[in-house]
Amino acid sequence: MSIGMEVNPIAVFGAGGFGMEVAMLIEQINAVAPIWRMEGFFDDGLPQGTQVNGWPVLGGLEALNGWATSLAVVFALGMPAVKRAVIRKVRNPRLSFPVLVHPTVIRGNPAHLSIGEGTILCAGVIVTTNIAIGRHVIVNLACTIGHQVVIGDYCAFMPGCNVSGEVTVGEGSFWGTGAKAINGKRIGAHTKIGAGAVAITDIPDQATAVGVPARVLLPR
Ligand SMILES: CC(C)(COP(=O)(O)OP(=O)(O)OC[C@H]1O[C@@H](n2cnc3c(N)ncnc32)[C@H](O)[C@@H]1OP(=O)(O)O)[C@@H](O)C(=O)NCCC(=O)NCCS
């Protein structure tokens, strides 16, 4: 480590498969510049002290809210509604929510990008220019986000999604692996876009849309 460089404690909320990948992402950021010290995971589904890939589970939400020192936290929870519900219960003023960007991400000029706290850009993502991404968004492996896209808080894009230029995505939208939207469409809040779907029309709030072209599923 170079002299004077600060190493900040960080933890991942969610010790499932995506949590393991976020821990890997942190290691890969550190391989370029050692800025994080991984303390462990928080997860309400595993006993405290459980080892996950060599890091301890430090407790659940209660332990996070009781954490006594400064700590950066990222939420590795795939489903937006679950993530939002957890984050709304976080009360600890010692916590901060960094943006994590894998070293392989290609991004436009930061002057033309806004990325909210807690958002994670995974390996191979491309984010071009004049884009606003909300808070606690997951952009998983090899997604592309085009010009003038606006993405609401808590959204999750699974690997290989393509968001074309001028698309607007409402809060809490979940996109399955390889989902796409053509330019200029509005994908509503709390929607689910199925794996492999191609949205060529606007998709209303709350809807689930699947297929090519994407069709909204009727409630059962
Ligand atoms: C779209 C999705 C969220 C719907 O889940 P669901 O509400 O549980 O829906 P169901 O599984 O009950 O399927 C409902 C109907 O949609 C169809 N369907 C579901 N997902 C589909 C998809 N991706 N493409 C085409 N059709 C799909 C089902 O075949 C079913 O059709 P039927 O009514 O004719 O039998 C889910 O299927 C999906 O694609 N999730 C993405 C998961 C993913 O990519 N994970 C990545 C982890 S890294």
Image: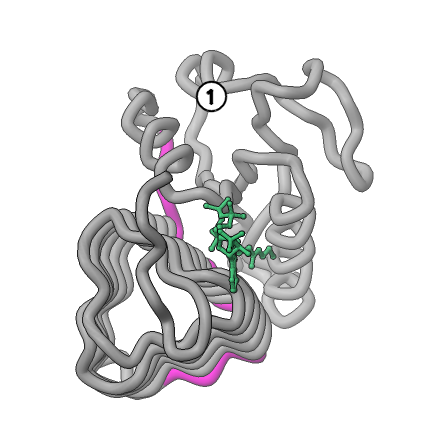
The residue nearer to you, when weighing 196 against 140, is: 196
How does the figure colour the protein chain or chains? one colour
Q: Is residue 142 left or right of residue 64?
A: right
Q: Is residue 114 left or right of residue 102?
A: left
Indicate the quadrant where residue 85 lies. top left
Q: Residue at x 59, y 67 (%)?
A: 33
Relative to 28, say whether 49 is above or below.
above
Counting from the top left corner in percent of width and height, residue 57 is at 67, 25
Relative to 129, say whether 65 is above or below.
above
Q: Residue at x 40, y 17 (%)?
A: 65
Disc 1 residue type?
A: Leu
Q: Residue at x 69, y 67 (%)?
A: 31
Counting from the top left corner in percent of width and height, residue 149 is at 23, 77
Q: Is residue 139 left or right of residue 201?
A: right
The residue nearer to you, when weighing 137 against 32, is: 137
The residue nearer to you, when weighing 121 against 45, is: 45
Counting from the top left corner in percent of width and height, residue 197 is at 45, 71
Q: Is residue 77 left or right of residue 30?
A: left
Q: Residue at x 66, y 65 (%)?
A: 28
Quadrant that contains the N terminus:
bottom right
The residue nearer to you, when weighing 196 against 15, is: 196
Quadrant that contains the C terminus:
top left
Q: Is residue 120 visible?
A: yes
* Residue range of the region highlighted in magenta in the rendering: 95-107
Q: Which residue is mark 1?
A: 64
| Count of marks overlaid on the render | 1
